[in-house]
Every structure is written in C-alpha cells, then in structure tokens.
Image (cartoon, rainbow, N blue to C red):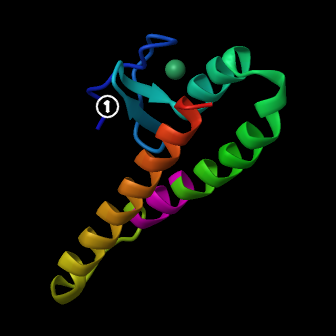
Amino acid sequence: MAEFNCYLCKNAIKTGEKFTFTKKGAVHFTCFISERSKEVKKEDFDKLRALTILMDSELQHLLNILAIKDIPAEIQEKIRVKYKNIEKEVNETTQMILSL
Ligand SMILES: [Zn+2]
C-alpha cells in the first residue's frame, strides 16, 4: 500500500487507513463520505447514513484481516479469498453511495 494518493485531499493513503476506489481513483473513506454528504439530496441522507455505517464496518473488517499475523500456510489461500469477497462488498457499497 501507500502508493495511492487520495483524489480529494491529495494526501497519500497510508497503511491502516480506510479507503475505497471509484472511477476517479483511490479515496479515503472519510473524504469520500464528506464529499458525498455535500452532494446527496436531503431526502437521501438516511440512506447515506446507513450505507456509511455499513461501509465503515466492511472496511474495518478488511483492516482486521490484514492485521492477522502468522497465518498458517494451509489457510492463507482461504483467508485471501475471504478478503477478496469483502473487497467486493466494499466496492458494491461504494457504488450504492455513488448512486445516491
Ligand atoms: Zn483523502
């Protein structure tokens, strides 16, 4: 990690920070949400709030997996696949937030 810069605040995205990708590139979770909250219509605020909580929890899940140390070789692939699946969930939630 750390090679990406956030397209909103322009700062590097550091290891352990929550982030996602859109068509524009990598973006911090907090930058993404604060940008969307300026753009989203008032009647969609409840949806944005719910999806923000969901995405925060999905991103935390990814960070928790990354923090597991000394994974035995026999289960490394299984855990990698699970990580990829949660990444897909994050991507889907990102798209839902973009569509508000
Ligand atoms: Zn940022």
Residue visible at 43% across and 37% down in the picture: 20
Q: Which quadrant, please, contains the C terminus?
A: top right
Q: Position of residue 29 (x, y in %)?
A: 55, 34
Q: Main secondary structure of the magenta part?
A: helix
Q: Height in image: 26 above or below 11?
A: below
Tell me, yes or no, whether the highlighted magenta stretch contains residue 3.
no
The residue range painted magenta reads: 59-65
Q: Position of residue 74 (x, y in %)?
A: 17, 89
Residue visible at 25% across and 69% down in the picture: 80
Residue visible at 58% across and 36% down in the picture: 97
Q: Is residue 18 visible?
A: no
Q: Position of residue 70 (x, y in %)?
A: 29, 76
Q: Is residue 83 left or right of residue 29?
A: left
The number of numbered discs placed on residues in the rendered structure image is 1
Residue 44 found in image quarter? top right
Q: Height in image: 63 above or below 83?
A: above
Task: Return the residue at label 1.
Answer: 2
**Disc 1: residue Cβ within 8 A of ligand 1's nearest atom:** no
Residue visible at 66% across and 46% down in the picture: 51
Residue 4 found in image quarter? top left
Q: Amino acid at mark 1?
A: Ala
Q: Is residue 62 left or right of residue 35?
A: left
- The furthest residue to the bottom: 74
